[in-house]
Image (cartoon, helix red, strand yellow):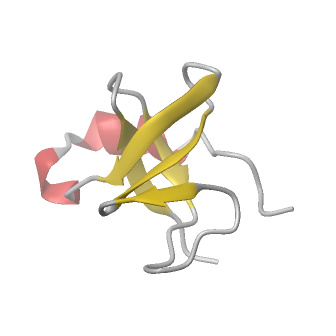
Amino acid sequence: MERTIVRCDKGGLYSSIWIPLVSFKAIRANGARIQWCPIHHRFQRTMPVDLSALTRAERTAAEGVRDLPIP
């Protein structure tokens, strides 16, 4: 499955499976999701990131960190 770079409210960047209008492992909240952040090790509000707003280093680092797989 294709992964999307997301950012949590605390600024953590990581990759997640993000299917619009579908969430198996998160709670949807007005375009955002509350899901487990692998950076901060807690549930955080998370939103997709515009890739053009990221540096190459940020994108590479975020692609290397993945959230929990779909159970």
Residue shown at the point (32%, 26%) measured from the top left: 11
Compared to 11, does 56 lie above or below? Answer: below
Q: Is residue 3 above or below residue 68?
A: below
Q: Residue at x 22, y 57 (%)?
A: 51
| Residue 37, image x, y percentages | 57, 33
Outermost residue to the right: 71
Q: Is residue 48 above or below residue 59?
A: below
- Which one is nearer the viewer's eye here, 4 or 55? 4
Q: Percent from the top left, x then y, of residue 19? A: 51, 77
Give the quadrant of residue 2: bottom right
Residue located at (35% from left, 45% from top): 59
Is 25 or 65 nearer to us in this picture? 25
Count of marks, rendered view: 0
| Quadrant the N terminus occupies | bottom right
Q: Residue furthest left?
A: 53
Residue 71's spot in the image, x, y percent?
87, 62
The one nearer the camera, 8 or 33, is: 33
